[in-house]
């Protein structure tokens, strides 16, 4: 274990108190992003499914516009798979790890080590969250494009 940089014990205790719940909050945010991703996939699936189910084969709707709408739908599904792909979120307070690494150190050194882990965990988890946010954004934009293409096809059939 690296030799900790000297820091005031009260400052260290304050930092730990302020940041202790951060990994749990990041995990909740990840779950929220995943829920939103599934809502986008559901909406995109309903759009493409209703179009396919309600448009008769002999209608005047340009088939190539409907076919084009499948491309953004595939982008929605692909980005959702990416967003939902299993990623291991880091946690700091795994009792086994804490015991194995900190059982024989001074309390201030243990707090310092935990604070170091919290900082590293935050960065790793933020990278996962950034990837989930980007995938959700792609899914939303693709779903909007899908809706525009379907609406254009339906309006073309009416004119």
Image (cartoon, rainbow, N blue to C red):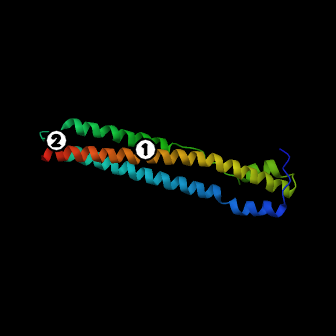
- Can residue 55 be seen? no
Q: Is residue 31 above or below residue 138?
A: below
User: Is 57 left, or right, of 113 in this rendering?
Assistant: left
SS for tag 1?
Answer: helix
SS for tag 2?
Answer: loop
What residue does disc 2 label?
61
Q: Residue 84 appears at what percent x and percent y?
A: 49, 45
> For residue 81, which quarter of the picture?
top left
Q: Is residue 120 above or below residue 17?
A: above
Q: Determine contact: label 1, label 2, CB under 8 Å.
A: no
Q: Residue 108 appears at what percent x and percent y?
A: 85, 57
Report the Cα–Cα distance between label 1 and label 2. Answer: 27 Å
What residue does disc 1 label?
138
- Can residue 38 be seen? yes
Q: Residue 28 appears at what percent x and percent y?
A: 56, 57
User: Along the polypeptide, which appears first: circle 1 or circle 2?
Assistant: 2
Q: Residue 47 appears at what percent x and percent y?
A: 29, 48
- Estimate how packed mark 1 is, as few (under 14), some (14 to 19) or many (20 or more) residues with alpha carbons within 10 Å: some
Direction front: furthest residue: 159
User: Is 71 left, or right, of 86 in this rendering?
Assistant: left
Please give the name of the residue rendered at 32% of the width and 44% of the height, measured from the top-left corner.
145
Q: Nearer the viewer, residue 92 or 3?
A: 3
């Amino acid at each position: 274990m690296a030799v900790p940089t000297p820091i005031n014990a009260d400052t260290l205790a304050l930092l730990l108190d302020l940041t202790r719940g951060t990994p749990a909050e990041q995990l909740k945010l990840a779950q929220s992003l995943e829920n939103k991703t599934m809502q986008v996939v559901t909406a995109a699936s309903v759009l493409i499914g209703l179009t396919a189910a309600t448009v008769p084969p002999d209608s005047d709707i340009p088939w190539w516009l409907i076919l084009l709408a499948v491309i953004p739908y595939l982008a929605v599904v692909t980005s959702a798979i990416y967003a939902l792909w299993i990623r291991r979120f880091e946690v700091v307070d795994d009792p086994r790890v804490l015991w194995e690494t900190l059982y024989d150190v001074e309390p201030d050194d243990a707090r310092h080590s935990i604070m170091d882990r919290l900082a590293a965990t935050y960065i790793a988890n933020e990278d996962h969250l950034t990837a989930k946010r980007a995938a959700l954004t792609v899914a939303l934009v693709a779903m909007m494009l899908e809706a525009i293409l379907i609406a254009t096809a339906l309006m073309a059939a009416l004119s």
